[in-house]
Amino acid sequence: MSKTGANFGGTVGWDEQTVIGKRAPRPGELKSESAIAAAQRAGIQIDTAKKYAAGNNKQHESAKNTAILDRETEELHHDRINPDVAR
């Protein structure tokens, strides 16, 4: 420990500001056509990537077991019991 007090690792002087809770700006995604065109005019490098298997997660396709279940004719039900069992 130094003679002037504890050193907390900061080098902040009187003329510097410390902003707490504000994050640095991150590069965003260009989603609109006008934003992409403006970036191209400004000379910014644009990276494009095609999504792998995009649109293959379809939930409206019929399952393979539906034909088997449609052909099923067995009557499935449980036998009823006397309500006195619950008392």
Image: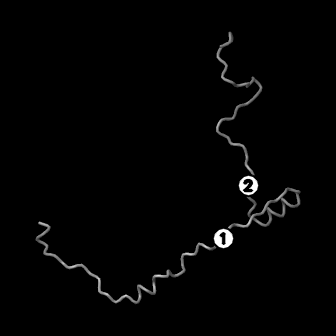
Residue plotted at (75% across, 52% down): 27
Classify residue 30 as left or right of residue 82. right
Judge by depth and name the residue closer to the eye, 71 or 35. 71
Q: How many labels does the image show?
A: 2
Q: Residue at label 1?
A: 54
Q: What residue type is labelled 1?
A: Ala
Judge by depth and name the residue closer to the eye, 52 or 27. 52
Quarter of the figure with residue 60: bottom right
Q: Position of residue 61 (x, y in %)?
A: 54, 80
| Separation of residues labelled 1 and 2 (CA atoms) | 21 Å
Q: Is residue 34 above or below residue 74?
A: above
Q: Position of residue 71 (x, y in %)?
A: 40, 90
Quarter of the figure with residue 76: bottom left
Q: Where is residue 38 in the image (x, y as percent from the top left)?
A: 84, 61
Q: Is mark 1 on a helix, strand or loop?
A: loop
Q: What element carries label 2?
A: loop
Residue plotted at (66% across, 70% down): 54
Quarter of the figure with residue 23: top right
Which mark, by number, is residue 28? 2
Residue plotted at (73% across, 67% down): 50
Label 2 CA crowd tier, 10 Å (few <14, some 14–19, many 20+): few
Classify residue 63 as left or right of residue 13. left
Q: In which quarter of the image is the N terminus?
A: top right
Classify residue 61 as left or right of residue 36. left
Judge by depth and name the residue closer to the eye, 39 or 16. 39
Residue plotted at (51% across, 82% down): 62
